[in-house]
Structure formats: structure tokens, C-alpha cells
Image (cartoon, helix red, strand yellow):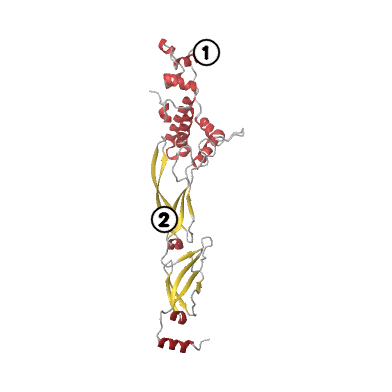
């Protein structure tokens, strides 16, 4: 039994030229031997079948003979004469009459198959220049180069740059600790892809995102062409946008970290040792010895966020103070304060 060229290209028997071209591009790219090093022998056989099917179905004469008589007659070239019933057939008669005009004394047809690499090169370009190349240059190498450009998303399968789907953005929530120390996040995605037969299916994938110390809110991490696939369109890039979760103690201001701390009036006058836990888990002992006024700020250099583009450098830790005044004082307390503070200039 002969080959079913329509089934090989996954098209209907009424497929148009454009249908055939689309089917050939998709399948030839998928089964090109250079793309299948692990099963090169199978891929080469499939690639040749796809090319042969396209060669026959895209040529009106070959397609008519194949549709009427099948592969064996097409390749043998021996066309049987028409029967009285077939002579009136609108599909049969033009075929036979054509060969009668071309070969009045015979009813044979010479089948000339085209080279698979030549067909491929017609779709995806070639390196011309008129010269030859001992390492497989010319049409074959040019076609392979075009093939890999297509796989990298720079061509749409017709040799020209294709339209790319709009990027898809997703929020990536990160704690301040993760942005301080760095972290790895694994994100599960699902997307639609097309298999060799042209059918869409959903695949799942785990993407690893390497959070660098010092990254800021709004930082974008791009995974090229990880969006859904659509025929004739380069898949969209998948973009994750860093967002910063609120922290119980610290607030970020650029590369600096801010802390608000309240002192009693007594502490603001006599001093205090403040204890903080840094974002990387260290205990910071901060000695306050000067008199602190409401709104004063203490700056600790190099205790802020890492600066992502300057290795080893950090911003500052800024402690902003508020002073809590007593709601009331007794007469005795007032007298004591007058006695102590009255002499202070």
C-alpha cells in the first residue's frame, strides 16, 4: 500500500497551497535531523517523508496523478488510458489530456523527486554567493542556519522576522530578608505548546529564579519565549517583577534601611542601649549616649541593604527617634526637674 501523503503532512485532501506550506514548515522544523541528534536516523527518515509529501502535493500535476492513481503509478510514470466512464470525469480528463498533449505517442510520466534540502532551503533561505563549501555550505548549510534562527525565536518560519506575542508579567513577592541575603525561588508554570502533529498540549515546567542580594522592587527577571505557543507567532517572554513584602521593623529607602524608635524623655536625656536584629540575623547593640531630640536621626554606615551593582557595599541604617513625654508630673517631680535642669544652660 502506498504512502498517504496527506496524513504525513497532517492536512485534509482539500488542503490549499497555504495549508501545505504551513504544515511543511511546522513538521520540517520539528523533524530536521540537526535538531534531533539523539534520534538522527528516525528524524532523517521522517524529514525525507515530509519533504516528499510536500513535493508531490504542492505540484498540481503530481498531486492530480497521486489523487487518481496513488503513489505507485506516480513513481512508475505509467498512466493507464481512460475508461469511457473516466473520460467524462472533470477530475480525470484534464490529467490524461495534459499528458496526451505532452507525449502524443505514449501515456507515461517521468517522476522527478526534489531534494529534501533544496525544498527546505526554499523556505528558510540559503547562503549563496556562487561558491561551494567543502563542509556542506550552500543551500544545505544556509537552511540549517535558518532553522536554528527559527528555534531561537528570530524567524517566524517563512525566512522573515515574525511577530512576537506581548510579554506576560507576573508579580514575584519577596521578603526584605530575601532581598537582603539573596534567595532561590522555584516557580511552576504551565503553557500551551504544539507537538509534531500540530496538536496543542499543556506542559508544566519549574523555573528557578536566583534573587540577587540588593535587588529592588520593580526588578524584572525575563524567561525568553516561555509563554504560550501560537502558530506563526513567536512565543511571549515570561517576566517576573519583584515586589517587596512589608517588614515588621525595617522600611527600605533606596539602599538604606529605616527604623523608627521611641525613647522616653528620661532615655532621651540619659541614654540607652538599643538592641536590633539585622536582616541576616546578627544582633546589633547600638549605644545612645548623646541627648536625643524628637526627630533626630542616627546613621550607622554600611548596615543598610546590599548594593547589587557594587559588590561588598551596603547602604546605611538610619534610626529615626521620637521622644515620648510624660502625660503628667507631680509637684515633687516638677520641683526635682527644676532643681536639676534649672542650672543647665
| On screen, residue 197 above or below 243 | above
Residue 146 visible in the displayed image:
yes
Q: Position of residue 205 (x, y in %)?
A: 40, 47
Q: Nearer the viewer, residue 94 or 320?
A: 320
Residue visible at 41% across and 87% down?
A: 331
Q: Nearer the viewer, residue 296 or 140?
A: 296
Residue denoted by label 1 = 101
Residue visible at 44% across and 73% down?
A: 261
Question: Sequence-wise, which precedes: disc 2 or disc 1?
Answer: 1
Residue denoted by label 2 = 185
Q: Position of residue 31 (x, y in %)?
A: 45, 35
Q: Nearer the viewer, residue 140 or 30?
A: 30
Q: Residue furthest right?
A: 130
Q: Residues within 10 Å of mark 1 (few under 14, many from 20)?
A: few
* Distance between the alpha carbons at the discs numbered 2 and 1: 72 Å
Q: Nearer the viewer, residue 2 or 136?
A: 2
Q: Position of residue 126 (x, y in %)?
A: 56, 34
| On screen, residue 174 above or below 82 | below
Label of residue 12 in the image: none
Q: How many marks?
A: 2
Hey, which quadrant is residue 273 in on the image? bottom left
| On screen, residue 55 above or below 290 | above
Q: Residues within 10 Å of mark 2 (few under 14, many from 20)?
A: some
Q: Secondary structure at mark 2?
A: strand
Residue 75 visible in the displayed image:
no
Q: Are marks 2 and 1 in contact (CB under 8 Å)?
A: no
Q: Position of residue 36 (x, y in %)?
A: 45, 39
Hey, which quadrant is residue 81 in on the image? top left
Residue visible at 48% across and 34% down?
A: 25
Residue visible at 40% across and 11% down?
A: 85
Q: Secondary structure at mark 1?
A: helix
Q: Which quadrant: the N terminus? A: top left
Amino acid at each position: 500500500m502506498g504512502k498517504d501523503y496527506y496524513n504525513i503532512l497532517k492536512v485534509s485532501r482539500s488542503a490549499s497551497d497555504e495549508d501545505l506550506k504551513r504544515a511543511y514548515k511546522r513538521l520540517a522544523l520539528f523533524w530536521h535531523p540537526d535538531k534531533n541528534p539523539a534520534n538522527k536516523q528516525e528524524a532523517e527518515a521522517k524529514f525525507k517523508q515530509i519533504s516528499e509529501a510536500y513535493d508531490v502535493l504542492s505540484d498540481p500535476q503530481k498531486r492530480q496523478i497521486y489523487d487518481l492513481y496513488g503513489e505507485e503509478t506516480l513513481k512508475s510514470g505509467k498512466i493507464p488510458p481512460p475508461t469511457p466512464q473516466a473520460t467524462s470525469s472533470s477530475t480525470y480528463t484534464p490529467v490524461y489530456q495534459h499528458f496526451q498533449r505532452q507525449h502524443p505517442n505514449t501515456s507515461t510520466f517521468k517522476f522527478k523527486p526534489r531534494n529534501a534540502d533544496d525544498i527546505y532551503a526554499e523556505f528558510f533561505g540559503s547562503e549563496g554567493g556562487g561558491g561551494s563549501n567543502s563542509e556542506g555550505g550552500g543551500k544545505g548549510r544556509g537552511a540549517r542556519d535558518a532553522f536554528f534562527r527559527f528555534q531561537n525565536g528570530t524567524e517566524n518560519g517563512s525566512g522573515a522576522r515574525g511577530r512576537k506575542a506581548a510579554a506576560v508579567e507576573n508579580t514575584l513577592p519577596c521578603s526584605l530578608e530575601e532581598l537582603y541575603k539573596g534567595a532561590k525561588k522555584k516557580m511552576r508554570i504551565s503553557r500551551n505548546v504544539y507537538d509534531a502533529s500540530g496538536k496543542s498540549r499543556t506542559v508544566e515546567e519549574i523555573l528557578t529564579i536566583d534573587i540577587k542580594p540588593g535587588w529592588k522592587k520593580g526588578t524584572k527577571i525575563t524567561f525568553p519565549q516561555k509563554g504560550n505557543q501560537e502558530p506563526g507567532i513567536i512565543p511571549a517572554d515570561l517576566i517576573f517583577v519583584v515586589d517587596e513584602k512589608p517588614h515588621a521593623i525595617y522600611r527600605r529607602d533606596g539602599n538604606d534601611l529605616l527604623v523608627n524608635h521611641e525613647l522616653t524623655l528620661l532615655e532621651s536625656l540619659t541614654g540607652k542601649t538599643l538592641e536590633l536584629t539585622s536582616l541576616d540575623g546578627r544582633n546589633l547593640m547600638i549605644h545612645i549616649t548623646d541627648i536625643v531630640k524628637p526627630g533626630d536621626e542616627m546613621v550607622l554606615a554600611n548596615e543598610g541593604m546590599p548594593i547589587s551593582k557594587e559588590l561588598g557595599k551596603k547602604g546605611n541604617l538610619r534610626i529615626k527617634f521620637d521622644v515620648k513625654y510624660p502625660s503628667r508630673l507631680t509637684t515633687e517631680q516638677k520641683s526635682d526637674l527644676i532643681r536639676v535642669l534649672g542650672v543647665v544652660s
